Image: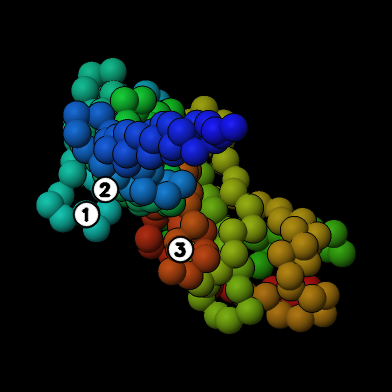
Amino acid sequence: MKLSYPKKLSRYACVVLSTALLLAGCKGKDGDPGPAGPSGTGLSGNITGFVNSVDENGVQLSKTGVLVTLDGVTPAITATSDADGRFTLSNVRAGTYNIVYSRAGYGTFRRIGVGHVGGDQATFLGTSTMSQVSTQTITSLTNGSSNMITVYLNLTVASPVPTNTFRVAFFASASPNPTPATGILISTSTIGSGGTFATYYSTTVGINRFSLTNAGFASGTTVYLAAFGATSVFPSYLDPATGRAVYPTFSTTSSPGIAVQL
């Protein structure tokens, strides 16, 4: 009796071989290589989103003209927001990017580690808010009559344009003269001048001692404080090089530094 297994096996092998050759010849859209690994590094696509812009008091401003850039990419890939705040970064290869938002008079904002897969579906970033930099400064800062619960600080805030609302951010550190780059943000305060517009305003602000101990300063130690002009909206991000929060809209002019005993 003649067996037919070899013929059946041969036909099966041909089907398997043909399928393997077909799969090996497959490519991505328009002849581009398909995804290389889980991140799809062979694909390109658009990154799109919106920007919102406000002044230091949170008042809505024009959304046009914000420059959006992929950090460290050569050749540069940039886009400019339109009247609706929309922007599109075109033909961006799949990868992970830091995205920079900038505009004259505004704090430069960054979005760190944005993943982009590429392909037909654009990566949507949602809406990012930018604020003008604070123009206010704290011209004096002294210790007030503190108690076991609250540290009171006497201060004077200055603004180049008369206003009835002043904003202050307090930073603390274990070393003298903390800054946003070296200290820890302890609190922000909005100070109203009772409806009276002024370029200088003096007041007293309280900081709960728990906010200092909760930030890692031990009871019984000396903590150094400094104050900076703040904004109604203050977007922040973590600097990947230092792991510290960055507050790009706070004034860079420091108040006089003071020492507080916890």
The answer to whether 86 is drawn above or below residue 260 in the figure is: above
Quarter of the picture holding the N terminus: top right
Residue extending furthest toward the front: 1
How much space separates mark 2 and mark 1, taking CA atoms?
A: 6 Å
Q: What residue type is labelled 3?
A: Pro
Res 20 label: none
Position above or below: 79 against 236:
above
Q: Quadrant of residue 42?
A: top left
The one of 26 and 81 positioned closer to us in this rendering: 26
Earlier-in-chain disc, 3 versus 2: 2
Residue at numbered disc 3: 240
The answer for how far apart the CA atoms under marks 3 and 1 are is 17 Å
> Callout 1: 10 Å neighbours few (<14), some, many (20+)?
few
Depth order, front residue of 123/136: 123
Query: For the residue marked with disc 2, what is the amino acid?
Result: Leu
Q: Position of residue 214 (x, y in %)?
A: 77, 62
Identify the secondary structure beneath mark 3: loop
The amino acid on which the numbered mark 1 sits, given as a three-letter code, is Val
Q: Quadrant of residue 191?
A: top right
Q: Residues within 10 Å of mark 3 (few under 14, many from 20)?
A: few
Is residue 215 something that shows in the picture?
yes
Closer to the eye: label 3 or 1? 1
Secondary structure of the residue carrying tag 1 is loop
Give left or right: position of 65 versus 43: left
User: Left or right: where does residue 63 sit relative to residue 131?
Assistant: left
Q: Circles 2 and 1: CB distance less than 8 Å?
A: yes
Location of residue 69 in the rendering, given as x and y in whole percent from the top left corner? 24, 45
Q: CA separation, marks 3 and 2?
A: 16 Å
Q: Mark 1 points at which residue?
A: 73
Badge 2 density bin: few <14, some 14–19, many ≥20, Cα 10 Å: some
Q: Residue 70 carries which label?
A: 2
